Amino acid sequence: MTKSDDKRVPALRFKGFTDEWEQRKLENITKRISRKNLNLDSTLPLTISAQYGLVDQRKFFDKQIASKKLENYLLLKNGEFAYNKSYSKDYPFGAIKRLNNYKLGVLSTLYIAFKPVSINTDYLEEYFDSTKWYKEIYKRATEGARNHGLLNISPQDFFELNLSIPNNRIEQERISEILKLLSLLITLQQRKVKLINKLKNALLTHFISKTSSQSASKTLKDITNIRGGYAFKSSEFTKSGFPVIKIANISQNGEIEGPYSYVLSLKSDYQLAKNDIVLAMSGATTGKIARVNSNNIYLQNQRVGYFVNNHKIDYNYLYYLLISDQFKRQLERILISGAQPNVSASDIEKFKFVILKSKKQQSKISTLFKHIDYVLKAGNNKMHTLIQIKQFLLQNMFI
């Protein structure tokens, strides 16, 4: 490959700053921490969460994993770092985090702890949030050396890691400042989405569950019925044609997601259209409600229930009834657990709901929730965009 053929994105630079970067060993810019908690300066056992960093072990696991005798644990101070050699699918080389939330805490000696001495600490934190250091761990911890979920890398090898660092300290600060501001935007957007969800749930409780003179108690069978799906044979599935919604396509978050199986023949009695409401009737997602969110013609597979739109109730209003606490509480009481959790249509149709009598009022309520869902979707999209921007910068602001 010639130089002109290389399509990789070059590392980002800031106008007015030097392009001089260097490779420096971790041992030359940090100092290893080996201090023990001999005087019990802290009784706070810590663990590393990939999402939240160094956190209280007791809250994270709902119990204390650490020994009750904490004297021989490492004592970590605010601003110091720790490396957890435990690996996972999303973190194949473990995680390195800084203690930000507490003044002091203790860690197992399986962790490698250190503090920065000649590098901007915020730059170092952002660097370890990227994947740029993975290749250095890879050189020192081979696949065959892994055991019990831990990477077999010694402290000596760990501190031999080479890091890419701008010589200019101001450039280090600017890089970390941009990334931290972006992290703050992501946190605020996550908080906003969480609050909107909380508002939605409160309104669902108020408008959907509250009994009044304008409402009446009815069973689900009074307003709709559930149609079972078609038992397609494995020989009917092809690589193209009409997509079939199976139980596996109804996700834990209540969305219909691919990949799909396809059939060539259209079963008109089991045809689903956009906004049709379906129910997972067995498997890991038993009881999950979802709406068809595409204009494609879908077909309904067995154990996927369809709530028939018979115009006895505003169909959008019905959807919000089905995702309310009224539905969830009744589902928990009848859910048949075991090797294959499942529910029956006849049991679901016995569920009772407090329902507004006027279809006009039902429509107004469903319109309100549709607006809230629109705002939620836009908020989630913005949050995911910000996360993608940060991931891009993490990969391209470091050489």
Image (cartoon, grey):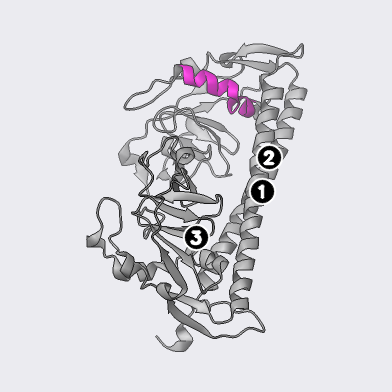
Q: Does the magenta-highlighted stretch encompass residue 320?
A: yes
Q: Which residues are magenta?
A: 318-333
Q: Residue furthest front?
A: 39
> Which callout, 1 or 2, points at the residue further toward the start of the chain?
2
Callout 3: SS: loop
Q: Residue at the spot x=46%, y=46% of the render? A: 258
Could you give the CA–CA distance between mark 3 and mark 2, rounded to whole angstroms? 35 Å
Q: How many marks?
A: 3
Could you give the CA–CA distance between mark 3 and mark 1, rounded to whole angstroms? 34 Å
Q: Residue furthest left?
A: 144
Dominant SS of magenta comes to: helix
Whether pointer 1 and pointer 2 mark residues with C-beta atoms closer than 8 Å, the reply is yes
Q: Nearer the viewer, residue 113 or 35?
A: 35
Q: Does the magenta-highlighted stretch encompass residue 140?
A: no
> Which mark, by number, is residue 116?
none
> Which mark, by number, is residue 80?
3
Q: Which residue is mark 1?
A: 379
Residue 26 visible within the image: yes
Q: Nearer the viewer, residue 201 or 7?
A: 201
Could you give the CA–CA distance between mark 1 and mark 2, rounded to whole angstroms? 9 Å
Residue 393 visible within the image: no
Q: Residue at the spot x=45%, y=47% of the render? A: 46
Q: Amino acid at mark 2?
A: Ile
Q: Position of residue 117 (x, y in %)?
A: 50, 71
Q: Position of residue 96 (x, y in %)?
A: 44, 59
Q: Residue at the spot x=70%, y=29% of the render? A: 203
> Which mark, by number, is residue 196?
2
114 sits left or right of 184 in the view: left
Q: Amino acid at mark 3?
A: Glu
137 sits left or right of 325 in the view: left
